[in-house]
Image (cartoon, rainbow, N blue to C red):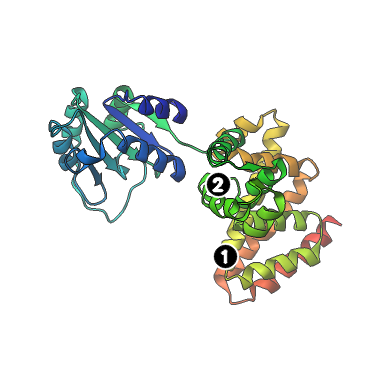
Amino acid sequence: MSYETVMKSLHNHTPVSVYLITGDQAYLVNRLKNTFTGLIPEEERTMNFASYDMESTPIAQALDDAMSAPFFGDRRLVFVDHAYFLTTDPHKGIKVDHDMDSLLTYLKHPEPTTVIVFLATTGKLDSRKKVVKTLKKVAEVVSLEAIGEHQIKQLVETDLQNNGFQMQPEAFSKLLQRTGSDLSLIMNELPKLKMASYDSKQIGVDVVQELVTKSLDQNVFDLVNDVMSKQIDAALSLYRQLILTKEEPLRINAVLVSQFRLLIQTKILVKNGYSQGSIASTLKVHPYRVKLAMQSTRRLKLDDLKRAYLGLIDIEKSLKSSTKDPETLFELFMLKFLNEVA
């Protein structure tokens, strides 16, 4: 079931008895949770709504609540939050006894007056587990994985239109770029963009450039472009700026390595006939990142990407095993890279 479909059914007050929510789109998860909560009249929520954190509470407690009849109301709502036992995430250190047999018994005959919502929004579902197989058969599964540019645009436009605002296409593109197409970041930025454009009700590219700070991923994307364009001064300047903003050198390097790995993988997959969507699915990365990678790799040689990648791996080893200055290591990397590709 898609996000749009489940939202429509909830607004129509036609929920099913069991839901399984997956994916790490925090903004969409929170909107869904708020909409589910709206199923219970506010004056009934004290008695007919409860949320249980599986990192600290046994599943049996949530099931006891789910099996109870609603108190002076039509239905009961139960959230089973952080359901890590449905995923491959080991969650080391958590010592909560979860009775899976009781859960399987409940799923055979869910309480018809209860809506129980399992939220497994961190880690990947472990489809080998019997309880996961059963849930997939019984529950409406709502997948909130990385969404595409078109869906993000629809959500942003809906929010803006509801408040009487419009955003220029160039401004939307810049917003995607600055936030790395992270929906939660985008929706967090919208209030200040609307406030800055309150009089005109038109959000332009200048406002986005002024108010939306580049994410580390976006800065690294620019850094990659500087490296591959052999612009040593621009690359060194941006690297120093990241250090001055207290970004850890190892983290900067890790994101650089990740970006070059993505460029190499994308170039190889494009050569083998993969589309943007299939690349995103295969590599399990956001479609917008793949879009940018495909644009970049058209003008880049695979051998040059490999040289840069291996050079950054060498920096990582030096950062972990020596006290050499990170800026000096990056400068030496740039000089060596330029000499090799000259």
Asked whether the viewer can see residue 49, the reply is: no
Image quadrant for the N terminus? top left
- Element on which disc 1 rests: helix
Asked whether the viewer can see residue 160, the reply is: yes
- Location of residue 170 with respect to 208 vertically, above or below: above
Q: CA distance from mark 1 to mark 2?
A: 23 Å
- Location of residue 276 with respect to 237 vertically, above or below: above
Residue 239 picture location, percent across and down: 68, 66
Residue 162 picture location, percent across and down: 53, 38
Left/right placement of residue 337 relative to residue 212 reads right
Residue bearing mark 2 = 182
The amino acid pointed to by label 2 is: Asp
- Location of residue 332 with respect to 120 vertically, above or below: below
Which residue is rendered at x = 81% and y = 61% of the image?
231
Q: From this viewpoint, which residue is outermost toward the right?
A: 342
Which residue is rendered at x = 30% and y = 43% of the image?
81
Location of residue 110 by image quarter: top left
Left/right placement of residue 208 relative to residue 15 reads right
The residue nearer to you, when weighing 247 against 48, is: 48
Camera-near label (1 vs 2) is 2
Image quadrant for the C terminus? bottom right
Q: Are marks 1 and 2 in contact (CB under 8 Å)?
A: no
Query: Which numbered marker is on residue 250?
Result: 1
- Location of residue 284 with respect to 248 vertically, above or below: above
The amino acid pointed to by label 1 is: Leu
Residue 296 picture location, percent across and down: 74, 44
The residue nearer to you, when weighing 202 against 305, is: 202
Residue 128 picture location, percent across and down: 34, 31
Left/right placement of residue 225 relative to residue 39 reads right
Location of residue 100 by image quarter: top left
